[in-house]
Image (tube, rainbow, N blue to C red):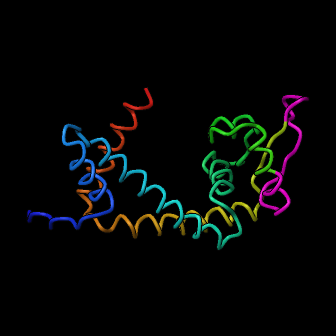
Amino acid sequence: MSASPEPRQDPVDAIIEQWARVRPDLDTTAMEVFGRVYRLARAMGDRIEKAYAKYGVSRGEFDVLATLRRSGEPYTLSPRQLSATLMLTTGGMTGRLDKLERAGLLRRSPDPHDRRGLQVTLTEEGLRLTDEAVGAGLAVQTEALSALDGERAERLAGLLRELLSATER
């Protein structure tokens, strides 16, 4: 296997070099990792937001549709289940549901098993849009990830899984 080319300097390198000049006693490894993770998440978030905008939804609204889609047929969850999955307050969820319902992408109906509850269900149009938009979002992510070969991408995914697991404990 050939050695990877030396990566170009990035803005995080400049920050690390500045800290090294004024505080050479600091170990900035964590700053190097999380500075890049943060910048990458922000850059990719912006790109994905643009991909979803072509379908008339924001990233947050897409997350609601995708959560319903991933739940499988009949693509129905309670607002509470959606809020818990997406880590949103009920108020934040209500705003998203209102907009998506007005757009005809989902519908709310009484829960037949709980007189006080509601069900949120993906409509046919919501299902179609979600399936198209998920492909567009994945295309953006795949294009960015193509900077790494398959083995390095898998290794990065594994390392990030370990780090995420350790920080969520």
Q: Position of residue 88 (x, y in %)?
A: 67, 39
Above or below — where is 124 with respect to 110?
below
Which quadrant of the figure has residue 11?
bottom left
Based on the picture, tell me whether residue 71 belongs to the magenta stretch: no
- Highlighted range, magenta: 98-117
Pick the front one: 58 or 154 = 58
Q: Residue 53 location, x and y as percent? A: 65, 69
Tell me which residue sits at (85%, 60%) in the image. Answer: 102
Determine if the magenta segment contains residue 103.
yes
Q: Give x and y (percent) for residue 147.
A: 30, 68
The extreme top residue here reads 169
Asked if residue 156 is positioned above or below residue 147 in the image, the reply reads above
Q: Who is closer to the viewer here, 60 or 150?
A: 60
Is residue 59 found left or right of 141 in the rendered image?
Answer: right
> On the rendered image, what quadrant is the N terminus found in?
bottom left
Q: Give the total number of marks visible in the rendering.
A: 0
